[in-house]
Image (cartoon, rainbow, N blue to C red):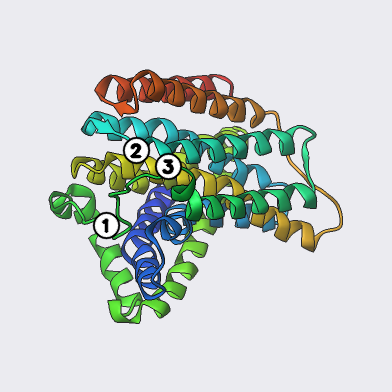
Amino acid sequence: MVLFSLIIALIISFYLLAHVCDDYFVESLDKVAKDLKMPSDVAGATLMAIGSSAPEFFISIISVLKPGDYAEIGIGTIVGSALFNLLVIIGASAIVRNTILTWQPVLRDSIFYSLSIVFLLWSFSDGQITMIEAGSFIFVYILYVVSVVNWRKILPYKDDSQVDMIEKDKESESSGWTIIFKPFDFLLSKCFLSANHYLINFFISISFIGGLSWVLVESAVMISHVLHIPQAIIALTVLAIGTSIPDLMSSIIVARQGRGGMAISNALGSNIFDILIGLGIPWMVILFLTDGPLIVGKENLISSVILLFASVVVVFIILLIRKWRLGKFSGILLISVYILYLVWAISNI
């Protein structure tokens, strides 16, 4: 009965988190980007990345601030989410519609994504995180944003993607899940103001995301205790998939619209943000509050990070062989790799 209640709490939290992020938080960020007249590349690499990565970011913060040794939950969620984004989101986008990618931004994001993974391996190598390591993550992300701003000067290209809000799939409005969760949608609508008050909605959204992320962390801890499963495994699988489902649905929608390149770029950019900022800032916060280094259990994480790096190599090789084209075969291959990863992760429990 306890396990059933925890699973229900997870499902409700995942749904509410997706609803708050998609309908309120990202919408507020989109309006802020327009008010600031930010270039699409910069807005995508900063504000839109924050919007799509907010759940993982807050889970990471809460896991390191929670009394006890729970840092693995935040790290596992981000590493697992990165694997899901790379293999499943890119794979699903390729299956929905054949895509010809603009290779210049993909090359840029692949370089910084690979660099992010190298930094992950470096920080996990001794099982502890220092202030220098945390600061280096943030520094590399700053370099990434600078490169986004200036990349067209280095490798000129035409970018047809837009940072505007993705239109919702009208068919989903009457789906079974929407009907089941309609009472929650009604309650949420009463907690937010009209779209004109987007700054207030922004802060209300942060409060909801923080609270729901706390519920997810607590539920993950309790489930790991009930099932006697390492917390890192729960984070690498259940939390990672749950927090990435909204990104998957959005990517499928833009892929259907013929903007598969945008979906793939967002997946890579989101992963870069997740790793460098989603881990760098929480680590820096906890190191400021404590005297010693942050100890992390690397047994269940190192192998996943290595697999993450291998997946980047596989995706890049596929793109080179296919001359920056992705189709159904490539998509099925990537999703199959993720399924094999899940089988491997579960078999190692």
Q: Secondary structure at mark 3?
A: helix
Q: Are marks 1 and 3 in contact (CB under 8 Å)?
A: no
Query: Considering only vertical position in the picture, is 1 above or below 117?
Result: below
Q: Are marks 3 and 2 in contact (CB under 8 Å)?
A: yes
Position of residue 281 measured from the top left corner of the image (x, y, whole percent): 65, 57
Residue nearer the viewer, 106 or 74:
106
Residue type highlighted by circle 2: Thr
Position of residue 8 measured from the top left corner of the image (x, y, whole percent): 39, 48
Q: Which residue sits at x=73%, y=39%? A: 123
Residue type highlighted by circle 1: Phe
Instruction: Find the distance from the CA under tag 1 to the CA under tag 3.
Output: 38 Å
Image quadrant in which you'd find residue 34 = bottom left
Residue nearer the viewer, 113 or 147:
147
Local crowd size for mark 1, using a 10 Å CA cut-off: few (<14), some (14–19), many (≥20): few
Determine whether, in the image, residue 225 is placed left or right of residue 317.
right
Which residue is label 3 attached to? 105
Q: Which mark is residue 181?
A: 1
Q: Is residue 6 visible in the rendered structure shown here?
A: no
Instruction: Find the distance from the CA under tag 2 to the CA under tag 1.
Output: 39 Å
Query: Considering only vertical position in the picture, is 58 above or below 155?
Result: below
Residue type highlighted by circle 3: Pro
Q: Which mark is residue 291?
A: none
Q: Which residue sits at x=65%, y=53%? A: 138
Q: Which mark is residue 102?
A: 2
Looking at the rendered image, the quarter that the N terminus falls into is: top left
Sequence-wise, the earlier of marks 1 and 3 is: 3
Local crowd size for mark 2, using a 10 Å CA cut-off: few (<14), some (14–19), many (≥20): some
Instruction: Find the distance from the CA under tag 3 to the CA under tag 2.
Output: 7 Å
Position of residue 7 measured from the top left corner of the image (x, y, whole percent): 43, 44
